[in-house]
Each structure stands twice: as C-alpha cells, then as structure tokens.
Amino acid sequence: MDNFLFFAMASLAETCYEAKENRNIENSLPWGKDVDSKQQSLLRKLPGVDRVLELWDRAQPVKDVPRTVLVRSIRTTLDRLRIKVLADNELLDETMFAENRLLRLAVQSVNKSLEFKLRHVINATGVVVHTNLGRSLLSEGVARHVAEILCRYSNLEFDLEKGERGSRYSCVEEILCEISGVEAAMVVNNNAGAVFLSLETLAKAKEVIVSRGELVEIGGSFRIPDVMASSGAKLVEVGTTNRTHLSDYEGAIRDETALLLKVHTSNYSMVGFTAEVPLNDLVTLGAKYHLPVMKDLGSGNFVDFSKYGLMKEPTVQETVATGADVVTFSGDKMLGGPQAGIIVGRKDALERIKKNPINRALRIDKMTLAALEATLHLYRDESKAVSAIPTLRMLTLPLKVISNRANRLRSRLRKLGNDLLEAVVINASSRVGGGALPLQELPTKCVGVRVKGLSASRIERIVREADPPIIGRIENDLFVMDMRTVQDDEIAVIASIFKKEV
C-alpha cells in the first residue's frame, strides 16, 4: 500500500508540475506578446510527462535507460515543443503531438543525454596545439602505457627497491634531470600552478622583480601579476613596456627582495625599439646579491625547432644551462605530453618547493604521471620524439605529406557523386597554437568545400553537429579543412560524414 501511495503521489506531482508549466507559459511570454487562441489550444493539448512515459513503457524504443534520464529527457522534449508553439514560426497543428512523433523526439533526447560530453572531434582548423580542442595529442604508445597503468595497481608511491613508501615524483624526476641537466625536478597540475607554488615558497610576503614587458596574460584571463598576488609575493615592476636594462633590476634590489623573475613572452612578440636582459646576465646579477633567479618558460620544449624550419625558441636545456635556480614550463603544448606544470632547478630550491603544503593541492595523479613519463622516454632519442609525438610530428610535417592528404580527401569527396558539392585544394597557413610561436606561419594545404544551396556557415554547422564533429574554418565562402591537423585515418571519416549529412 505504501508503494502504491508513493507512486500515485509521484504521478500526481508530475501532472501538477506539467499543468503549472503550461499555465506559466500561457500567462507569461518572454517575447512580450499575448498567447493567441490557437497557441492556447495547442498548449492545453500538449501531453504531460506521465503520458509520454506510458507510451515509452509500452514501446520500449531504447532499452535500459535510467529512469531519471528518461524523465529528464521527456521533460526536455516537451519543453522544446512548448517553445515551438510559442515561437509560432511555422504552421503548427495537433499532429505535432502525435504519439510516434513524441516517441521519436524523446528517443533523440534520450540518446543525446546518454552521450559522453567529452568526445573525439576532428581538428581541421590547422591549429596544432588547440586549447579548445584538447591541446596536445598523446602518442599511441603513450596511450597504451597509460591504459595499462590505469587498469592495474602501480607503484605510484611505493619504492620497490626499499620495500617502503616512496615519492610519486620519483618516476619522472630522474628522467627530467637526465634530459634537462638539472639537479632536481617535480611536477604539478599545470604551469600556472608551478609558477604559483614556486613564488609562494620562495617569495611569500617578499618582493619579486619583473620587467614590465614580461607581465603576460595567459589563457582564461590569468595574468602573471594576479598569480603573483595570489601567492603572497609582492610585484616590483622595472623598465618600460618595450625596454628593460640590467641597471633597472639592480636599482630595484633591496632588503625585501626575494627573487628575480624572468617570464618568456611565448604568447606574443614585441618588435622594433626593444631591449631585454638576457637570462644569464640576470643570473650573474642574482649571484652578486645572493638572490635566486626564476625563469617561467611558459610553453617549454626539449627540441630546437629552428633545426626544422621553425622560429627559434629557447629550449629547457639552454635555459637550465644559464644557471637559473628554478625553471617552470608546461608538460603539454609544444612538449606534447599531458597537461602538467614542470618545475626543475637547483636541489635546495626544489626541496623547499616540494615541502610546501600547497603542493598536495596541486599534485598530479597516476594518469598524468604515466603519460608524462612515457612521453619523456621518447625524448631520449630526438628523432624518435619528432616522429612519435603527434604535436612535434604535425609541427614538422613536410608540405608534400600535407598535399597528399589534401588530394586524397578531395578525391574521396568528388567520388561521392554529389553534383552539388565542390571540393578544391587551396594554399593556406597553419598555426602552432597554445600561445606558442605567435608569429610562426606554417605553409599548409587545405580542402575547401562549397555546396550549392548551402552557405559556408550552414555547412560548418552541419559537420560540427555530426558524429564525430568536424571543426574547421570559413574562408572566402568556403568551408575549409586544414590537412596538417587532420589525421590520416580521419580522411575516410570526413568523406563518410559529407556523404551522410550534406
């Protein structure tokens, strides 16, 4: 009897909810106009959630749907129908509430609710390190190693040699020291965290001297001055926006000074009448006054990309060789690993940072550690790293390879037999992305598509809503797909999407 009463009350509550919703919509329109008689009539005939549930239980169009998901999906479906009635943007009648149509719409809503929100997309933008699309890709070998670690127990914080508790940094510290030539290393969740933790440890309530031209803003509107203020360090700006000299730093040093900070302007470039202090000169100045020097590389890299035709960026090894006490950089972006903030430098400084209680709030998990360690192993052989790490491979991809991809996709699209669809290969430029090498243009080949009767923006929306979504760009009334960032096995997928959706 109790169960009967419970379900009866639940059904009554649901019916009352729907009736209230209908009254609310009838009584108040966001568009600021009255509901006409036809709309009122349609709203009254709109079935409630309980009625659609009955239809669902009878037909069972999708099996094993959690009840909460089903109810929410049906409610979403009915809400959309209400909006359509109120919008009055097409001829409507009672057939829009037909049982088969209601079920079909409910199935679509259920399937949408059951989809994963984080999904594979095809990056056809030409931006290699695309922050909105997941930044760097892990190599297949690295992904396999991560999967193995996740599906089994691991020695995350266990010293197998001593048979006792160990440090989670041990699996990456040794190889980071080997590659970069430092005394000690550690890893946190991202580079902003690395900068924050280092400043909080080394300069809390003390002054940190920075050039005005290096007070950068990184993604998400986070700024170096804001990170510094949160750490408790006091910012001391020296020089001007475009020119800073060693004498500016030295003139600002006093008893309250705790650190000299240099920030690499990796996400913008300043040209013209400019001057900055080389890091090795700043290190010499720091030694003179017994002050530690910290370098924030931002998007760090272990490979000199100038050897592959790209602009010169300071490598981690070159930065460490100057004698900087602490160097911070990202584990993803141009490094091509997982999102992480890497801190390397002198052992005494790193030991202090490791012991900071805030470190626990910023520490990384076994997934990130497994991915980072496996990626770092590839850097022991630069040629292997460039060929195996997707980010490095895409950045150094020969134009001939990209051209072959473009021709293959164009050929597949033309063979679809759609007389309304036109596909052409065009010359364009790709970008590094992730705030790195902002002036670098990478010659590329794109496939541009136009469809008679469809605007480029309409094509863009159709393929963006496909499965998997294709994310491209619009240029000169063409939907453009940059083949530098399209993977080889995605060419056939793109062709099938255009065949099905366009």
Image: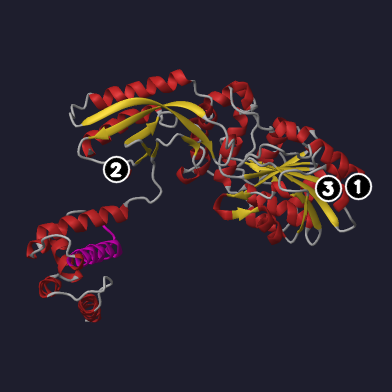
Percent x, y of residue 273: 72, 38
| Rendered residue at 22%/66% (across/down) | 83
Q: In which image quadrant can residue 492 be found? A: top left
Q: In which image quadrant can residue 419 be found? A: top left
Q: In which image quadrant can residue 90 be found? A: bottom left
**Mark number displayed over residue 450:** none
User: Nearer the observer, disc 1 or disc 3?
Assistant: 3
User: Nearer the observer, disc 2 or disc 3?
Assistant: 3
Residue furthest to the top? 400
Q: Earlier in the sequence, mark 2 or mark 3?
A: 3
SS category of the residue bearing label 2: loop
Asked if residue 76 lies in the magenta stretch, the reply is yes
Tell me, yes or no, if residue 432 can be seen here. Answer: yes
Q: Earlier in the sequence, mark 2 or mark 1?
A: 1
- Image height check: is 412 above or below 480? above
| Image side of residue 319 versus residue 103, left or right | right
SS category of the residue bearing label 1: loop
Tell me, yes or no, if residue 381 can be seen here. Answer: no
Percent x, y of residue 295: 74, 43
Report the magenta residues as a range. Answer: 65-85
Q: Residues within 10 Å of mark 1 (few under 14, many from 20)?
A: few
Name the residue that disc number 1 marks: 289
Front residue of 258 and 155: 258
Compute the Cα span from label 2 to label 1. 61 Å
Which residue type does callout 1 highlight?
Answer: Tyr
The reply to whether dot 2 and dot 1 touch (C-beta < 8 Å) is no
Q: Residues within 10 Å of mark 2 (few under 14, many from 20)?
A: some
Name the residue that disc number 3 marks: 248
Percent x, y of residue 351: 78, 48
Front residue of 311 and 434: 311
SS category of the residue bearing label 3: helix
